[in-house]
Image: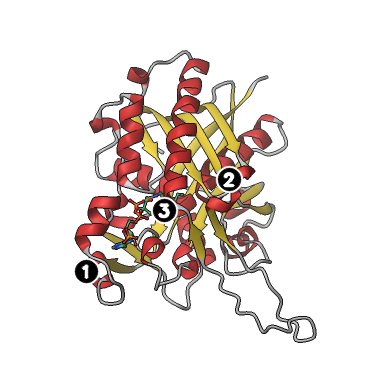
Amino acid sequence: MNIGTKIVAIDYEVAKNKITNDNLTKILDTSDEWISTRTGIKERRVLSPNETSADLGVRAAKNVIKRANYNGDEFDMIIVASSAPEEIYPSVACRIQGEIGAKKAACFDIKAACAGFVYALNTAQAFIKSGLYKNILIVATDATTKFTDWEDRSVCVLFGDGAGSAILRANENEDDILAIDLLADGTCADYITLTTKGTHCPLVNEENQEIKPYIQMKGKDVYKFVMQEIPPKLEELLTKTNKTISDIDYFVPHQSNQRMIDALAQRLEIEESKVISNIEHYGNMSAASIPVAIREAVDEGKMKLPATVMLSAFGAGMTAGNAIVKLEKNI
Ligand SMILES: CC(C)(COP(=O)(O)OP(=O)(O)OC[C@H]1O[C@@H](n2cnc3c(N)ncnc32)[C@H](O)[C@@H]1OP(=O)(O)O)[C@@H](O)C(=O)NCCC(=O)NCCS
């Protein structure tokens, strides 16, 4: 028997605190006009100090479990895509497992930055195809605003906090993941970094160095990388599935910058009405961007199901993950 992967349901949760571009002008030398025209972002969500990306992930997990009418103990595995969790251990997956009663589930986190959801999708698919696991919960959660320097106007205006979730199930023969492709290029590792390098040990640290765990980004290099690497990979996926761009009902790119979304859509020659974007309201929510964009588009009637959907995610590493998936009516 050929084991396929069914995408059972997709859901999300975003942080509650809404910060507009005008709010940011109170703490930064910036303007709504600069941010809107360069990025398409108007507002973003920011977690409260006592909340963590695991808390957001738990809420996204509970939402998708309710939507799919699952019980926590039905999961064999929880895969969390989270690249800057507040705790190095335990894993975010274990935190979520404890809150949803998924006693039987193996749990681990993967770190592929903004490409995390597609990396998790492919990892889950591989476990399902192998026959080892049947029901897998994926949560993509990032609270990136905790790691942005709020005095660095070129970075902090871009990000927001959110979590997306999906349930995948083993399915006889049919696979909702029609094609998927992951890539990484460590020669570009310095394009986006978040480091805690240094030491606190007073016997070693003679210089009393200051450790600043903030995101550093070479924005122009990131932009170039995406425009060079992503379009040919998406073309390859179309060829692999014997499809042309007109067979794609919707394109859901990583929500990093509206200009990048527009440029990718233009290169693909896909109609504007098929391109899903919610960056205006959330900014870049890292791994959560794609599942949040899908759920919201379906709920708002912008995405009609069933549909063939092309996903494209990219981020620090540099990492990227592209996929063509089938989304059924009741996801
Ligand atoms: C970040 C990004 C919007 C910057 O746009 P850009 O056109 O490259 O802008 P630059 O960095 O060249 O900055 C241009 C000027 O605007 C200024 N500037 C930067 N951020 C600003 C802000 N928030 N408000 C006002 N001015 C700002 C810079 O200081 C610079 O001023 P200068 O010319 O006097 O030095 C763009 O490079 C980008 O989106 N890159 C991709 C990043 C990304 O998506 N990363 C995540 C991928 S997962």
Q: Residue at x 56, y 56 (%)?
A: 82
Separation (CA) of disc 3 from disc 2: 30 Å
Separation (CA) of disc 3 from disc 1: 26 Å
Q: Residue at x 38, y 61 (%)?
A: 154
Q: Which residue is mark 1?
A: 22
Q: Pick the quarter of the image with the N terminus.
A: top right
**Residue 63 locus on image (x, y percent):** 44, 55
Q: Pick the quarter of the image with the C terminus.
A: top left
* Nearest-to-viewer mark from 3 and 2: 2
Q: Which residue is mark 3?
A: 12
Q: Residues within 10 Å of mark 2 (few under 14, many from 20)?
A: some
**Residue 91 locus on image (x, y percent):** 65, 61
Q: Which residue is mark 2?
A: 188
Q: Left or right: where does residue 220 sit relative to residue 167? A: left
Q: Residue at x 51, y 69 (%)?
A: 52
Q: Nearer the viewer, residue 213 or 104?
A: 213
Amino acid type assigned to the residue bearing label 1 in the image? Asp
**Residue 102 locus on image (x, y percent):** 63, 56
**Residue 48 locus on image (x, y percent):** 41, 75
User: Sequence-wise, which precedes: disc 3 or disc 2?
Assistant: 3
Placement of 291 over or under 88, stated as above or below:
above
Amino acid type assigned to the residue bearing label 3 in the image? Tyr
Q: Are marks 3 and 1 in contact (CB under 8 Å)?
A: no
Q: Residue at x 75, y 86 (%)?
A: 202
* Element at label 3: strand
Task: Look at the numbered disc 2 and say if its residue's Cβ is closer than 8 Å to ligand 1.
Answer: no
